[in-house]
Image: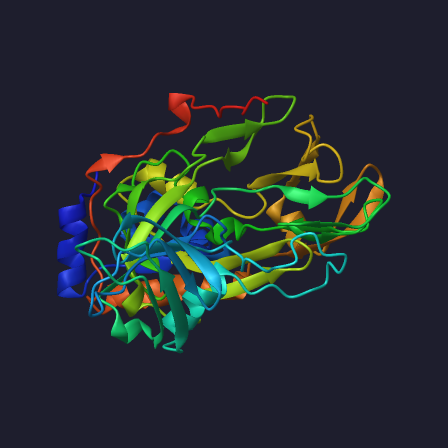
Amino acid sequence: MSEKTYQEINARIRSGKAVVVTAEEFIDIVREKGLAHASREVDVVTTGTFAPMCSSGAFLNFGHPAPRIKMHRVWLNNVPAYTGIAAVDAYIGATELPDDDPLNSNHPGEFRYGGGHVIEDLVAGRPVRLKAVGYGTDCYPRREIETTITIHDINEAILFNPRNAYQNYNCAVNLSNRTIYTYMGILKPNLGNAHYSTSGQLSPLLKDPHFKTIGIGTRIFLGGGIGYVAWHGTQHFPAIQTDASGKELGPAGGTLAVIGDLKQMSPRWLMGTSYLGYGATLSVGIGVPIPILNEEIARYAAATDADLYAPIVDYGEAYPNRKPGNLGYVSYAQLKSGKIVVQGKEVPTAPLSSYPRAREIAGILKEWIQKGEFFLSEPVQLLPSPADGLTGKVLKG
Protein backbone atom coordinates (compact mmCIF):
# COMPACT_ATOMS: atom_id res chain seq x y z
CA MET A 1 0.00 0.00 0.00
CA SER A 2 1.34 3.46 -0.87
CA GLU A 3 1.50 6.05 1.88
CA LYS A 4 -1.03 8.82 2.16
CA THR A 5 0.28 12.35 2.59
CA TYR A 6 -0.87 15.23 4.74
CA GLN A 7 -1.63 17.17 1.58
CA GLU A 8 -3.89 14.41 0.25
CA ILE A 9 -5.74 14.08 3.56
CA ASN A 10 -6.23 17.85 3.85
CA ALA A 11 -7.54 17.93 0.28
CA ARG A 12 -10.09 15.29 1.27
CA ILE A 13 -11.03 17.32 4.36
CA ARG A 14 -11.46 20.40 2.16
CA SER A 15 -13.75 18.52 -0.24
CA GLY A 16 -15.75 16.93 2.56
CA LYS A 17 -14.65 13.40 1.61
CA ALA A 18 -12.27 12.61 4.47
CA VAL A 19 -13.12 9.62 6.62
CA VAL A 20 -12.63 10.72 10.21
CA VAL A 21 -13.32 8.48 13.20
CA THR A 22 -12.54 8.49 16.89
CA ALA A 23 -9.99 6.06 18.31
CA GLU A 24 -12.83 3.99 19.77
CA GLU A 25 -14.58 3.82 16.40
CA PHE A 26 -11.32 2.90 14.66
CA ILE A 27 -10.86 -0.06 16.99
CA ASP A 28 -14.31 -1.32 15.95
CA ILE A 29 -13.55 -0.84 12.24
CA VAL A 30 -10.29 -2.79 12.53
CA ARG A 31 -12.04 -5.54 14.46
CA GLU A 32 -14.76 -5.79 11.80
CA LYS A 33 -12.85 -5.23 8.56
CA GLY A 34 -9.21 -5.89 9.36
CA LEU A 35 -6.20 -3.63 9.68
CA ALA A 36 -5.34 -3.36 5.98
CA HIS A 37 -8.87 -2.34 4.99
CA ALA A 38 -9.15 0.11 7.90
CA SER A 39 -5.83 1.79 7.05
CA ARG A 40 -7.01 2.35 3.46
CA GLU A 41 -10.51 3.51 4.40
CA VAL A 42 -9.79 5.87 7.31
CA ASP A 43 -7.92 9.16 6.92
CA VAL A 44 -7.83 10.52 10.47
CA VAL A 45 -8.25 9.03 13.95
CA THR A 46 -9.08 11.50 16.73
CA THR A 47 -7.99 11.06 20.34
CA GLY A 48 -8.67 12.79 23.63
CA THR A 49 -7.63 13.14 27.24
CA PHE A 50 -8.92 15.24 30.12
CA ALA A 51 -6.92 15.05 33.33
CA PRO A 52 -5.00 17.07 35.90
CA MET A 53 -1.77 18.30 34.28
CA CYS A 54 0.44 20.09 36.77
CA SER A 55 3.07 21.44 34.38
CA SER A 56 0.71 24.06 32.96
CA GLY A 57 0.42 27.82 33.06
CA ALA A 58 -0.20 31.02 31.13
CA PHE A 59 1.82 34.02 29.95
CA LEU A 60 -0.12 37.25 30.50
CA ASN A 61 0.61 40.76 29.24
CA PHE A 62 -1.39 43.27 31.28
CA GLY A 63 -0.64 46.45 29.33
CA HIS A 64 0.90 49.58 30.84
CA PRO A 65 -0.91 51.86 33.30
CA ALA A 66 -0.25 55.60 33.53
CA PRO A 67 2.33 56.21 34.83
CA ARG A 68 4.13 53.04 33.73
CA ILE A 69 5.28 50.36 36.14
CA LYS A 70 7.92 47.64 36.02
CA MET A 71 6.16 44.85 37.87
CA HIS A 72 8.58 43.25 40.32
CA ARG A 73 5.96 41.19 42.13
CA VAL A 74 2.48 40.25 40.89
CA TRP A 75 -0.45 38.53 42.57
CA LEU A 76 -3.65 37.37 40.85
CA ASN A 77 -6.44 36.68 43.34
CA ASN A 78 -3.62 36.55 45.91
CA VAL A 79 -1.73 33.87 43.93
CA PRO A 80 1.84 34.91 43.01
CA ALA A 81 2.83 35.03 39.33
CA TYR A 82 6.41 35.04 38.05
CA THR A 83 7.52 38.45 36.73
CA GLY A 84 11.15 38.05 35.70
CA ILE A 85 10.25 38.45 32.03
CA ALA A 86 9.49 42.10 31.23
CA ALA A 87 7.76 45.14 32.70
CA VAL A 88 4.12 44.02 32.49
CA ASP A 89 4.47 40.35 31.54
CA ALA A 90 3.92 37.51 33.99
CA TYR A 91 3.60 33.73 34.01
CA ILE A 92 1.02 32.15 36.30
CA GLY A 93 1.76 28.50 37.08
CA ALA A 94 -1.04 26.02 37.67
CA THR A 95 0.34 24.72 40.97
CA GLU A 96 1.22 28.09 42.54
CA LEU A 97 -0.48 28.77 45.87
CA PRO A 98 -1.14 32.02 47.81
CA ASP A 99 1.65 33.22 50.07
CA ASP A 100 -0.52 32.60 53.13
CA ASP A 101 -1.59 29.09 52.11
CA PRO A 102 -1.17 26.66 55.03
CA LEU A 103 1.31 24.43 53.20
CA ASN A 104 2.09 22.57 56.43
CA SER A 105 -1.54 22.39 57.46
CA ASN A 106 -2.65 19.70 59.85
CA HIS A 107 -5.95 19.68 57.98
CA PRO A 108 -5.20 17.84 54.73
CA GLY A 109 -8.81 18.07 53.63
CA GLU A 110 -8.63 21.81 53.05
CA PHE A 111 -9.51 23.10 49.58
CA ARG A 112 -6.68 25.05 47.99
CA TYR A 113 -7.20 27.84 45.46
CA GLY A 114 -4.16 28.14 43.21
CA GLY A 115 -2.84 29.10 39.81
CA GLY A 116 -5.05 26.60 37.99
CA HIS A 117 -8.13 28.25 39.47
CA VAL A 118 -6.87 31.70 38.40
CA ILE A 119 -6.52 30.39 34.83
CA GLU A 120 -10.05 28.94 34.94
CA ASP A 121 -11.43 32.23 36.28
CA LEU A 122 -9.70 34.16 33.47
CA VAL A 123 -10.96 31.78 30.78
CA ALA A 124 -14.48 32.01 32.19
CA GLY A 125 -14.36 35.82 31.95
CA ARG A 126 -14.63 36.25 35.72
CA PRO A 127 -13.03 39.29 37.38
CA VAL A 128 -9.59 38.68 38.83
CA ARG A 129 -7.89 40.95 41.35
CA LEU A 130 -4.46 42.12 40.14
CA LYS A 131 -1.94 43.51 42.59
CA ALA A 132 1.57 44.50 41.51
CA VAL A 133 4.52 46.30 43.07
CA GLY A 134 7.63 47.73 41.44
CA TYR A 135 10.84 49.32 42.65
CA GLY A 136 10.59 52.44 40.48
CA THR A 137 12.88 53.56 37.67
CA ASP A 138 13.07 56.66 35.51
CA CYS A 139 11.19 54.91 32.70
CA TYR A 140 8.86 52.97 35.03
CA PRO A 141 8.27 55.30 37.99
CA ARG A 142 5.10 53.77 39.40
CA ARG A 143 5.64 51.56 42.45
CA GLU A 144 2.28 49.81 42.90
CA ILE A 145 -1.08 49.15 41.35
CA GLU A 146 -4.15 47.26 42.48
CA THR A 147 -7.09 46.78 40.16
CA THR A 148 -9.58 44.27 38.78
CA ILE A 149 -9.12 42.71 35.36
CA THR A 150 -10.80 40.19 33.10
CA ILE A 151 -9.21 38.32 30.22
CA HIS A 152 -10.78 40.88 27.88
CA ASP A 153 -8.89 43.76 29.55
CA ILE A 154 -5.37 42.48 28.87
CA ASN A 155 -3.34 42.33 25.68
CA GLU A 156 -2.36 38.69 25.43
CA ALA A 157 -3.15 35.54 27.37
CA ILE A 158 -1.19 32.57 26.09
CA LEU A 159 -1.56 29.10 27.55
CA PHE A 160 1.87 27.50 27.55
CA ASN A 161 2.13 24.12 29.24
CA PRO A 162 5.66 22.68 29.44
CA ARG A 163 4.55 19.11 30.16
CA ASN A 164 1.11 17.79 29.19
CA ALA A 165 -0.58 14.67 27.80
CA TYR A 166 1.67 12.17 29.58
CA GLN A 167 1.85 9.17 27.28
CA ASN A 168 1.21 6.73 30.08
CA TYR A 169 1.19 6.98 33.83
CA ASN A 170 1.49 4.89 36.95
CA CYS A 171 -1.22 2.98 38.70
CA ALA A 172 -0.65 4.33 42.21
CA VAL A 173 -1.10 2.22 45.34
CA ASN A 174 -0.03 2.55 48.97
CA LEU A 175 1.69 -0.30 50.81
CA SER A 176 2.23 1.72 53.98
CA ASN A 177 -0.02 1.55 57.03
CA ARG A 178 -1.13 5.20 56.84
CA THR A 179 -3.27 7.26 54.47
CA ILE A 180 -1.15 9.41 52.16
CA TYR A 181 -2.08 12.55 50.21
CA THR A 182 -0.46 12.69 46.77
CA TYR A 183 -0.83 14.17 43.30
CA MET A 184 -2.44 10.81 42.48
CA GLY A 185 -5.12 11.55 45.06
CA ILE A 186 -5.76 10.09 48.50
CA LEU A 187 -4.26 6.61 48.72
CA LYS A 188 -5.57 4.41 51.49
CA PRO A 189 -3.20 2.28 53.55
CA ASN A 190 -2.46 -1.39 52.99
CA LEU A 191 -3.55 -1.48 49.34
CA GLY A 192 -6.90 0.11 50.15
CA ASN A 193 -7.32 1.57 46.64
CA ALA A 194 -5.56 2.17 43.33
CA HIS A 195 -5.64 5.33 41.17
CA TYR A 196 -4.66 5.84 37.53
CA SER A 197 -4.71 8.87 35.25
CA THR A 198 -4.62 7.97 31.57
CA SER A 199 -7.52 7.55 29.14
CA GLY A 200 -6.10 4.33 27.70
CA GLN A 201 -7.26 3.58 24.18
CA LEU A 202 -8.27 7.23 23.64
CA SER A 203 -5.02 8.70 24.99
CA PRO A 204 -3.20 10.72 22.28
CA LEU A 205 0.36 9.54 22.78
CA LEU A 206 -0.62 5.91 23.26
CA LYS A 207 -2.00 6.02 19.71
CA ASP A 208 1.32 7.17 18.21
CA PRO A 209 3.91 5.58 20.50
CA HIS A 210 6.89 6.17 18.18
CA PHE A 211 5.95 9.81 17.42
CA LYS A 212 5.69 9.23 13.68
CA THR A 213 2.95 11.88 13.25
CA ILE A 214 3.14 14.07 16.38
CA GLY A 215 5.82 16.77 16.42
CA ILE A 216 6.58 20.45 16.52
CA GLY A 217 3.76 22.33 14.82
CA THR A 218 1.11 19.60 15.16
CA ARG A 219 -2.29 21.30 15.39
CA ILE A 220 -4.38 20.04 18.32
CA PHE A 221 -7.51 20.57 20.38
CA LEU A 222 -6.31 22.48 23.46
CA GLY A 223 -8.55 23.65 26.27
CA GLY A 224 -11.54 23.96 23.96
CA GLY A 225 -9.68 25.94 21.28
CA ILE A 226 -7.00 25.23 18.71
CA GLY A 227 -3.44 24.90 19.93
CA TYR A 228 -0.12 23.48 18.79
CA VAL A 229 2.65 21.20 19.93
CA ALA A 230 5.54 23.58 20.63
CA TRP A 231 8.25 21.08 21.60
CA HIS A 232 8.61 17.78 23.38
CA GLY A 233 7.52 18.18 26.97
CA THR A 234 9.82 18.23 29.96
CA GLN A 235 10.63 14.75 31.26
CA HIS A 236 10.06 13.37 27.75
CA PHE A 237 11.66 9.94 28.00
CA PRO A 238 9.63 7.71 25.64
CA ALA A 239 10.10 3.96 25.85
CA ILE A 240 8.31 0.72 25.07
CA GLN A 241 7.49 -1.23 28.24
CA THR A 242 8.18 -4.96 28.38
CA ASP A 243 7.55 -7.59 31.02
CA ALA A 244 10.09 -10.11 32.30
CA SER A 245 9.46 -12.34 29.28
CA GLY A 246 10.07 -9.50 26.84
CA LYS A 247 6.41 -9.08 25.87
CA GLU A 248 5.60 -5.52 24.79
CA LEU A 249 3.16 -3.81 27.14
CA GLY A 250 2.74 -0.53 25.31
CA PRO A 251 4.55 2.79 25.47
CA ALA A 252 5.36 5.11 28.36
CA GLY A 253 7.26 8.29 29.09
CA GLY A 254 6.43 10.70 26.26
CA THR A 255 5.14 14.21 26.96
CA LEU A 256 4.17 17.34 25.01
CA ALA A 257 4.81 21.06 25.45
CA VAL A 258 1.73 22.81 24.07
CA ILE A 259 0.70 26.38 23.33
CA GLY A 260 -2.50 28.22 22.41
CA ASP A 261 -4.57 31.39 22.74
CA LEU A 262 -6.23 31.35 26.16
CA LYS A 263 -8.88 33.75 24.87
CA GLN A 264 -10.23 31.00 22.57
CA MET A 265 -10.55 28.45 25.34
CA SER A 266 -13.31 27.28 27.68
CA PRO A 267 -13.56 26.64 31.43
CA ARG A 268 -15.11 23.29 30.54
CA TRP A 269 -11.71 22.17 29.24
CA LEU A 270 -9.45 24.17 31.58
CA MET A 271 -10.57 23.50 35.14
CA GLY A 272 -8.82 24.52 38.35
CA THR A 273 -8.42 21.46 40.53
CA SER A 274 -7.55 21.01 44.20
CA TYR A 275 -6.01 17.84 45.57
CA LEU A 276 -6.80 17.28 49.22
CA GLY A 277 -3.64 17.50 51.28
CA TYR A 278 -1.45 18.17 48.24
CA GLY A 279 -2.22 21.42 46.43
CA ALA A 280 -3.64 22.93 43.27
CA THR A 281 -3.34 22.09 39.59
CA LEU A 282 -5.18 22.51 36.29
CA SER A 283 -7.23 19.85 34.51
CA VAL A 284 -6.61 20.19 30.78
CA GLY A 285 -8.46 18.84 27.75
CA ILE A 286 -6.26 17.82 24.82
CA GLY A 287 -7.13 16.07 21.57
CA VAL A 288 -4.64 15.09 18.88
CA PRO A 289 -5.56 13.97 15.35
CA ILE A 290 -3.61 10.95 14.07
CA PRO A 291 -3.33 10.88 10.26
CA ILE A 292 -3.49 7.28 9.03
CA LEU A 293 -0.60 7.58 6.61
CA ASN A 294 0.10 3.86 6.41
CA GLU A 295 -0.66 0.48 7.94
CA GLU A 296 2.00 0.78 10.63
CA ILE A 297 0.43 3.94 12.05
CA ALA A 298 -2.98 2.28 11.77
CA ARG A 299 -1.77 -0.69 13.84
CA TYR A 300 -0.70 1.55 16.71
CA ALA A 301 -3.89 3.62 16.48
CA ALA A 302 -5.93 0.41 16.81
CA ALA A 303 -4.45 -0.55 20.20
CA THR A 304 -7.16 -1.34 22.75
CA ASP A 305 -7.36 -1.01 26.52
CA ALA A 306 -6.46 -4.71 26.69
CA ASP A 307 -3.21 -4.01 24.77
CA LEU A 308 -2.03 -1.07 26.90
CA TYR A 309 -0.55 -1.42 30.37
CA ALA A 310 0.34 0.82 33.31
CA PRO A 311 3.01 0.01 35.92
CA ILE A 312 1.75 -0.48 39.48
CA VAL A 313 3.86 1.68 41.82
CA ASP A 314 3.92 2.00 45.61
CA TYR A 315 3.55 5.69 46.54
CA GLY A 316 3.85 4.98 50.25
CA GLU A 317 7.59 4.32 50.30
CA ALA A 318 9.11 3.49 46.92
CA TYR A 319 7.96 6.51 44.87
CA PRO A 320 8.94 9.36 47.22
CA ASN A 321 12.32 7.79 48.01
CA ARG A 322 13.15 6.80 44.43
CA LYS A 323 13.34 3.12 45.31
CA PRO A 324 12.39 0.31 42.90
CA GLY A 325 8.67 0.10 43.42
CA ASN A 326 7.19 -1.54 40.33
CA LEU A 327 4.72 -4.15 41.55
CA GLY A 328 3.92 -5.40 38.05
CA TYR A 329 1.75 -4.17 35.21
CA VAL A 330 -1.98 -3.94 34.72
CA SER A 331 -3.97 -3.34 31.54
CA TYR A 332 -6.34 -0.43 31.15
CA ALA A 333 -9.11 -2.95 30.55
CA GLN A 334 -8.44 -4.34 34.03
CA LEU A 335 -8.20 -0.87 35.56
CA LYS A 336 -11.48 0.18 34.00
CA SER A 337 -13.19 -2.95 35.32
CA GLY A 338 -13.10 -1.34 38.77
CA LYS A 339 -10.74 -3.74 40.49
CA ILE A 340 -7.31 -5.29 40.10
CA VAL A 341 -5.28 -7.84 42.07
CA VAL A 342 -2.04 -6.67 43.69
CA GLN A 343 0.05 -9.03 45.80
CA GLY A 344 -2.89 -11.40 45.95
CA LYS A 345 -5.32 -8.75 47.21
CA GLU A 346 -8.30 -7.42 45.29
CA VAL A 347 -7.97 -3.62 45.11
CA PRO A 348 -10.67 -1.16 43.92
CA THR A 349 -9.59 1.23 41.17
CA ALA A 350 -10.60 4.78 40.26
CA PRO A 351 -9.44 7.20 37.52
CA LEU A 352 -8.23 10.75 38.04
CA SER A 353 -8.75 11.39 34.32
CA SER A 354 -12.24 11.50 32.81
CA TYR A 355 -12.93 8.96 30.09
CA PRO A 356 -16.34 10.50 29.18
CA ARG A 357 -14.64 13.89 28.71
CA ALA A 358 -11.87 12.26 26.63
CA ARG A 359 -14.54 10.68 24.44
CA GLU A 360 -16.24 14.07 24.08
CA ILE A 361 -12.98 15.74 23.02
CA ALA A 362 -12.32 13.07 20.38
CA GLY A 363 -15.86 13.62 19.11
CA ILE A 364 -15.52 17.40 18.97
CA LEU A 365 -12.23 17.15 17.09
CA LYS A 366 -13.81 14.68 14.65
CA GLU A 367 -16.67 17.12 14.04
CA TRP A 368 -14.30 20.06 13.46
CA ILE A 369 -12.39 18.09 10.84
CA GLN A 370 -15.53 16.79 9.14
CA LYS A 371 -16.85 20.35 8.86
CA GLY A 372 -13.60 21.57 7.34
CA GLU A 373 -12.89 23.82 10.35
CA PHE A 374 -9.69 22.01 11.33
CA PHE A 375 -6.88 20.84 9.03
CA LEU A 376 -3.89 18.69 9.84
CA SER A 377 -0.49 20.31 10.11
CA GLU A 378 2.58 18.31 9.19
CA PRO A 379 5.24 18.58 11.92
CA VAL A 380 8.26 20.69 11.03
CA GLN A 381 10.27 18.32 13.24
CA LEU A 382 9.31 15.02 14.83
CA LEU A 383 9.80 14.47 18.55
CA PRO A 384 12.35 12.11 20.11
CA SER A 385 11.07 8.53 19.97
CA PRO A 386 11.78 5.37 22.00
CA ALA A 387 14.56 4.58 19.51
CA ASP A 388 16.49 7.62 20.77
CA GLY A 389 16.90 6.05 24.21
CA LEU A 390 16.49 9.21 26.28
CA THR A 391 16.80 8.83 30.06
CA GLY A 392 16.21 11.22 32.92
CA LYS A 393 18.75 12.78 35.27
CA VAL A 394 18.74 12.33 39.05
CA LEU A 395 19.25 15.49 41.11
CA LYS A 396 22.10 15.05 43.55
CA GLY A 397 21.93 16.33 47.08
Looking at the figure, which quarter contains the N terminus?
top left
Q: At which x and y percent is residue 122?
A: 38, 70
Q: Is residue 47 visible?
A: no
Q: Which residue occupies 16% across, 58% down?
A: 12
Q: Which residue occupies 77% across, 51% down?
A: 193
Q: Which residue occupies 45% across, 53% down?
A: 32
Q: Is residue 363 visible?
A: yes
Vertical arrangement, residue 124 with respect to residue 348, above or below: below
Disc tally is 0
Q: Which residue occupies 52% across, 47% down?
A: 304
Q: Horizontally, is 52 left or right of 277 in the view?
A: left
Question: Looking at the rendering, which quadrant does residue 136 occupy?
Answer: bottom left
Camera-side residue of 4 and 395: 395
Looking at the figure, which quarter contains the C terminus?
top right
Q: At which x and y percent is residue 323?
A: 69, 26
Vertical arrangement, residue 99 with respect to residue 149, above or below: above
Camera-side residue of 347 and 11: 347
Q: At which x and y percent is residue 68?
A: 21, 63
